[in-house]
Image (cartoon, helix red, strand yellow):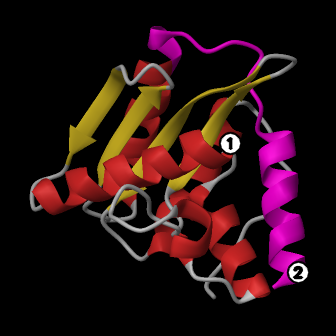
Amino acid sequence: MEELLKVLEMQEEILQFSHFTNADAWELGNQIVMEANRRNQSVAVSIRLNNGYTVFQYGFDGTTLYNEEILRRKYNTVKFTEQSSMHLYIQLRLEEIAQEEILGPGTEYAAMGGGFPIRIEEVGVIGAIVVSGQDHVLDHDLIVKCVSKYLHVDEVPRIHGL
């Protein structure tokens, strides 16, 4: 688990943007949709800014309001922790802590993979890329692969199954 946490920390350190505009969200969002289609994964994808504005959203046929709800929870988790939702998932497992102990009771958050911070170098986290529809590790990996491709970063460690 500690090794997985180090991989996630490296991903978040490496995959930072120099800038992020609505045009970037459109291009990256479409890249995620195309990669999910190539993988034959029926997912919902959303890119949201910290002010709550959704700059990109798409749902494959077969996605539902359930996926929309999970997108919202993963977004809230990234916004609250300024880390990937997978990062929180691994931290909680490593420390043997229930999600409610950190995030409180209720259904506002989701400590599972599929939410990744949009971090601007020397600025901080300005939003999140969220995916819902597959196993949460696959959701996370889809984002990492597409962000690394979008940023032209070849060497990003990845997580494959837990």
Q: Would you call the spot at circle 1 few (<14 residues within 10 Å), some (14-19), or many (20 or more)?
A: many
Instruction: From this view, report whether residue 43 is shown above or below residue 105.
Output: above
Q: 140 or 80, which lies in front?
A: 80
- Magenta stretch? 1-24
In the rendered image, residue 2, in percent from the top left (x then y), is placed at 88, 80
List the residue tagged with mark 1. 82
The amino acid at mark 2 is Glu
Q: Which SS class for mark 2?
A: helix
Instruction: From this view, report whether residue 29 is shown above or below residue 80.
Output: above
Residue 19 location, quadrant: top right
Residue at 47% from the left image edge and 72% from the top image edge: 136
N-terminal-most mark, 2 or 1: 2
Left or right side of 14 for 90: left
Q: Label 2 vs label 1: CA separation? A: 19 Å
Residue at 45% from the left image edge and 45% from the top image edge: 75
Residue at 77% from the left image edge and 16% from the top image edge: 18
Q: 121 or 60, which lies in front?
A: 121
